[in-house]
Image (cartoon, coloured by chain):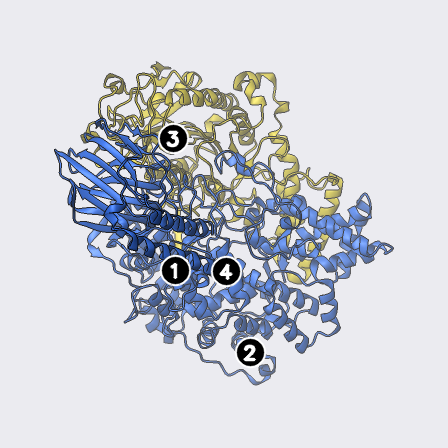
Chain colours: A blue, B yellow
Amino acid sequence: MTLSDWAAGIRCVAAAVAVAGAVAAALPAQSEEAASDPRNWGYERAQKSVPVVPGDKASWCRDDIDRFVVTGLHAAGLSPSPVADPAVLLRRLHLVLTGLPPGPEAVREFLADPSDATYDRIVDELLRSRAAAEHLASDWLDLARFADTYGYQADFECRTWPWRDWLIRSLHENKPWDRFVREIVAGDLLPDATIESRTATAFWRLHRQTNEGGSIEEEWRHEYIADRVDTFGATFLGLTVGCARCHDHKSDPISQRDYYALGSFFAIDESGLAPYSTGGVPQPAIRLMSTEQRAEAAELRAAVATAQRAFDAALPDAAQRAIEPVAERLPELRCDGDRRTRVKDVPGFTRADPFRLELELWNPTESERAVVLHTSRYTLDADTQGYQILTRDGRLCWEIVHHWPGSAIAVRTKAPLPTGRWVRIVASYDGSSRAAGLGLTLDGAEVAIEVVRDHLQGPATVRTFELGGRDRDRGFAGGRIRNVRVFDDCVTAASQKLRDARRALHAFVERIPELMVMAPHRHSPARYLLRRGAYDDPDPAQPVPADVPASVLSFGERSRDRLGLADWLLAPENPLTARVAVNRLWRLAFGRGLVAAADNFGTLGGRPRQLALLDALAVDFQNTPDMRAMLRRIVQSSTFRQASTCSPELRERDPDNELLARGPSFRLTAEVLRDSALAASGLLSDRSFGPSSKPWQPPGIWRDAGVGWGGADYKPDQGADAHRRSLYTYRKRTAPPPDMNVLDAPSREVCIAARQSTATPLQALVFFNDPVFTECAAAAAESVVGAMPGSDGSVRLRELFLRLAGRLPQPAELRALMPLLQAGSDDCHALTLAASTLMASDVMVMLR
Amino acid sequence: MNPFLDSTRRAFLGHSAGGLGALALNDLAGGDGVLQKPHFAPRAKRVVYLFQAGGPSPFETLDPKPMLRERHGEQLPASVRGGQRLTGMSGHQTNLPLAGAFTRFARHGQSGLEVSELLPYTARLADRLCVIRTMHTEAINHDPAITFFCSGSQISGRPSMGAWASYGLGSDNADLPAFVVLVSKDARRDQPLYQRLWGTGFLPGEHHGVQFRPGKAPVLFLDNPEGVSDDQRRAQLRALRELHREQFRTEHDAAIQARTAQAELAFRMQASVPEVADLGSEPDSTFALYGEGARDSGTYASNCLLARRLLERGVRFVQLFHQGWDQHGNLPKGITQQCAQTDRGTAALLLDLENRGLLDDTLVVWGGEFGRTSYCQGRLTKSNYGRDHHPRCFPIWLAGAGVNAGHVHGKTDDFGYNIAEGAVHVHDLHATMLHLLGIDHERLTFRFQGRDFRLTDVAGRVVRDVIA
């Protein structure tokens, strides 16, 4: 490893030198100073300076965007392209803003009056539509690595869709960008935090989580924090920071220390493993209560309080104890550490029950960990549900657990448990779900204890009662246990009433689904830089309190929590956040950002050709943090409205359209391709929000992969649910929907800021043969034939073309498709062949 | 007239995509690799990787340890274990008793290679194998470990081995994907497999491994929809070409012609894929070699035979996966079954390749993602035991092109717990595989997020000792 670190360092130095050279060569002379600065353009605050447009070009300009573009074109000896054909422009506008093509009526209306006023009205209508929010959300789902399963090994389902609903709702109500960011980053810490704002923070929990038996929890906790840091970097700073996990990032001014300090914002009280035998939700989590449910829960809580008062008034505690045990095992047990002894007929106490365990222990040694008594199925801490007595570092621990450590109450003795002699232990619990309700006595005397966890939020279901060890855990080797007695301390009418009130509250609350979210860590361990990124090699000389890369902007006096981090992101002096946000909106319209490498605003990303434009938009966005307004400006610009057609010379000179001498053209995303086919054929369901849907996919894919233990296969939804928009498609990370996969949709295993866009033969097979698409082709054909029963074939073909492509065909296009009218077995079939062909063609696959 | 099936690739491209830029050519599946020519003379033209997923135990297969039998039930000395981390499954065990193998080993061939009695067919080919007994890896759980083996990184999103080979060298068959994946249907599916294991990562999408499934339509979406004949599909493709011609006239975008070419290639795959996957044309002698089980499409044996058919048609990289080697408990029964399912098919593939003269330039690799502990996980009895994951040392074997046949590389200690000499890291294996393909692993790179990535990350050295 040392050798490879060394090699890595050498490589990065070499790369940095090469890039610095390239950047310097590309910059005009007056920028030399900036080029020699180890920081680069991305780290300098954006300035706005609108150029003076040459007189004859001014009339072309509708927006500052156009002023930058036309000035650049003028300097390059070029002129803008003419405005696109109205039907092409309308299709472009619809697809960019909503991800759906315009319907035939919309096309006809616009063609009847393609004025600026009509265009502006359509822009506003589209921007306000739910479809627009859904389309914008699709982009965020890649950043959020949003999926419906945990993504490792057995890849079980996890419940994430409430976050997607939050996202769509937020975009639909056009939540101001600064509020949007604050909710995602620190929705739990806001002074006005609500269930909604806490839901936003699930963004940081959507990374993959492992359930694999034997995983080392500490390793995975670090893994998850690393994912959050990588996602933070790519989403908000446009930076790929992952390289700094193992060593200083020579090419960007992000140090290894920066990397771990950033991670300290994202440490939460989590297990490291997704619970699998208890089937719960990883903690920390919130219950997504409606207003009515909150009111009902408050009533139940009030009932508990009333019962508590009656209980307190009735008798002193000591008198409330049972005298006779409900279960016991008296003979001495000599433990070897592996063998476990089960005691039958112990009542399955809930967390509402007061109960007490008495036992005598002979502790051989102050061991690091030993299980004395437990009631769970497995050892893995995420699954140690129930109650348990352990020794940890020689000290006696008494714990009641829903999911360790995020939802549990636990105390431990301050002094080690005596060794080499019998000790009589009483561990009691009062049913309060609070650590204060846990009692421990040794040889009849109170002992000094400390609270380890005090946050029990769910059922601590008992599954067994075992002494001396636990499956896959470290047992009480060499220890002895005798005279074990279990007491049910719910002995008076008052205590029964209190227990019943608590049970009623728990029964109500625990039925309400949970969502994993961010929450402050009440027991945060000190964090250190990890040498070479290894979880088990922290450098004690380098503690890493929460901090940000000062090369971007120093953190200043802000509060050292995620709320402060959100403020830092949104600070006017922060050079990256607004640029990255604006660049993402630009990419939505043009298929390519003004900075092409969306996750690489660092040195290696190169200086963007349209930096001045980007900066002007970033400054405007900081002043008016309104995503919808920014999108409106972009699509209303003359730049956007240009025709995408161009001469071979221009295409060769500017293949990526960096100069913007023509309108956008790009391949549509997997989601838009499928959604367009569904919409154009009339099959698209308009059901929004809620759990994911399962459109058709070839049988056997889940089963074959062995994914989802038990051989469960994918069961497609029937009817309209199979035809919902693709952002609602169920995403199993280890076996993603195959057609989406072929069309370059990422697997959602990690944060992706910019997708690939490829053309492969498998894509042609999808368009022509995938039932998801052929069903659409057939439905489109049928509906055209149904609507125009007596029409001539070419008239129907024109209508089909209009519905699918959002414009009428050119004569040559019609001629190309006409032979298919003779190829089909009947009219409908012939049109189906034509529809399939269109779906596979540039006409539908590309935005032009 | 069939304008597609009878044309050579070059003529086809010349005809349909005149003026197609180099960029668009690279977008074509079955196209040329990024390397104009290999960095040096390749020993292997193609690879078949027989991945035994789950972590086969060394002690019952290729690395006999008599001492484990002698000291059966004794504790693993702490000095041997050192600071080695254990999984959470056996890491808390109070006892770590050594478990001797229930199997016997014998020496085979002129090389005297020791192979377990559970692998009688493989044993007969001892002189063709080069066993590396000293593989080691960094991961200790299945998911990260198999991801690491298949892509050189535990982190998701990196290209897989086959994707790199496809990216570097392209394909020798324009009508088939360069990288094909086959998953045994007869395996015990304990540990899952993931798409990412044959993913393309950040490399262009056409390098993604294409999974061939059992049955008549091995590739997803290969069959025309019901009611669409080949003639009708041809008519569609003609219409598509005409549409694109019109589109190109105004857009001058080479991607348009690339899309035409892709659709036509897809059409050819509709013929070439079922042809290669149809084992009906194989003579009875083939099944005498592979076993009758090979007639059942999707079994390991059948996939071995299919692998040969793919390789002889120029597919660059074929990767088989056979799950079920994860014997935490009941190892004797479990591993006996695993070996019985795979041994004959593996050996038959080797022999078949040899008989056809393909073994000279085909690299064959056999192995899993890690090894297993020499101590027992769970309860040790006289005849039953289990073994936990062990990343510190485990055997794999190579055969074929340029491989030092009949050779054993490296030595593990008497406990089978640590490497005594000749350690080979996963990156080293990858470097060696690329080397045999004529590729300098440090020079096959792809720029992504501002950094040049490679299969071997920033490590890897060619293991000269395993090369003849």
Which residue type does callout 2 highlight? Asp
The residue depicted at 26 percent of the width and 20 percent of the height is B68
Marks 4 and 2: same chain? Answer: yes
Callout in the foreground (2, 1): 1
Mark pair 2, 3: CA separation: 62 Å
Please determine if labels 4 and 1 lie on a single subunit: yes
Q: Amino acid at mark 1?
A: Gly
Pointers 1 and 3 in contact (CB under 8 A)?
Answer: no
Host chain of mark 4: A
Identify residue for label 4: A292
- Separation of disc 4 and disc 1 at Cα? 39 Å
| B117 to the left or right of A373 | right
User: Element under label 2?
Assistant: loop
Residue corresponding to mark 1: A233
Image mark for residue B55: 3
Per the image, the residue denoted by label 2 is: A63
Q: Which residue sits at x=82%, y=58%?
A: A795
In the rendered structure, are the residues bearing label 2 and label 3 in contact, judged by CB atoms less than 8 Å apart? no
Whether marks 2 and 1 lie on the same chain: yes
Q: Quadrant of the C terminus of chain B?
A: top left
Residue at the far bottom in the pictured view: A55
The residue drawn where x is 74% and y is 39% is B229
Question: Separation of disc 1 and disc 3 at Cα?
Answer: 36 Å
Residue A676, placed above or below residue B433: below
Of the pair A560 and A797, the residue shown nearer to us:
A560
Q: Nearer the viewer, mark 4 or mark 2?
A: 4
Exactly how many numbered labels are in the figure?
4
